Amino acid sequence: MIVTIDGPAGAGKSTVARALARRLGFRYLDTGAMYRAVALGAMRRKLDWQRPEELAQLAERLQIELSEDRVVLDGEDVSEAIRSQEVTLKTRHVADNIRVRGYLVGLQQAIAEGGNVVSEGRDQGTVAFPEAECKVYLTASPEERARRRLRDLAAQGESATQAEVLAAQTKRDQRDSSREVGQLVRAADAVEVCTDGMSIDEVVDHLVSLVGGRGAGH
């Protein structure tokens, strides 16, 4: 069974998806980490972002391994490195690359084939897994999402103001909703869940019920 969780940045997708997968005994697939890993690989090689073909060639050479809590790039654990603000800002070049996105979506589909997976990202229910048995569109108010991002940055030792995070978030929302590929859009058959005022456990409890209603067995 495949459960997809899509939604805007800061909605809590990664935290909730990881907890849901653990609760269900499913594999957790963090697709955003794949794009971030490619961006980090490109940054380290000082690739020219204006040369999309070189970026695509790099993506196809990189060895990206995902587990519940770790992201390994060419044998190195980059779980922390890919979450930096610098990588966040550069990942859009990877996400907008049609060839890179096609390649990574293919990897995602191969990873999930024949298994029970909770996959989170921006286009999981619309592009990667349009036939998924259970689709969730996770969201939250812009203010709540900005507060969460601010907490994440502080935990990483990076400084920013609420206004800066909110402004960057608004730009990203506009960009994500107007992309030519991997556009952020709620799948017609997705259940929208707003997480404002809900604890992680409350959100996961709700999603477990949704998955159960779709006939999950494990």
Image (cartoon, rainbow, N blue to C red):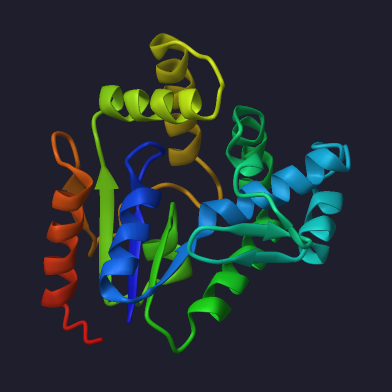
Residue 211 percent location from the top left of the image: 19, 72
| Placement of the C terminus among the 4 image quadrants | bottom left
| Placement of the N terminus among the 4 image quadrants | bottom left
Q: Tell me: residue 63, above or below residue 179.
A: below
Q: Tell me: residue 95, above or below residue 61.
A: above
Residue 47 percent location from the top left of the image: 87, 40
Residue appearing at x 50%, y 58% in the figure? 69
Q: In the picture provided, is 162 more to the left or to the right than 206?
A: right
Q: In the picture provided, is 69 more to the left or to the right than 149?
A: right
Residue appearing at x 27%, y 73% in the figure? 24
Residue appearing at x 44%, y 54% in the figure? 121
Q: Quadrant of residue 21?
A: bottom left
Foreground pick, 77 / 149: 77
Q: How many marks?
A: 0
Q: In the picture provided, is 150 more to the left or to the right than 203?
A: right
Q: Tell me: residue 40, above or below residue 116.
A: above
Residue appearing at x 16%, y 78% in the figure? 214
Foreground pick, 108 / 162: 162
Q: In the picture provided, is 117 more to the left or to the right than 157?
A: left
Residue 199 percent location from the top left of the image: 18, 42
Foreground pick, 95 / 1: 1
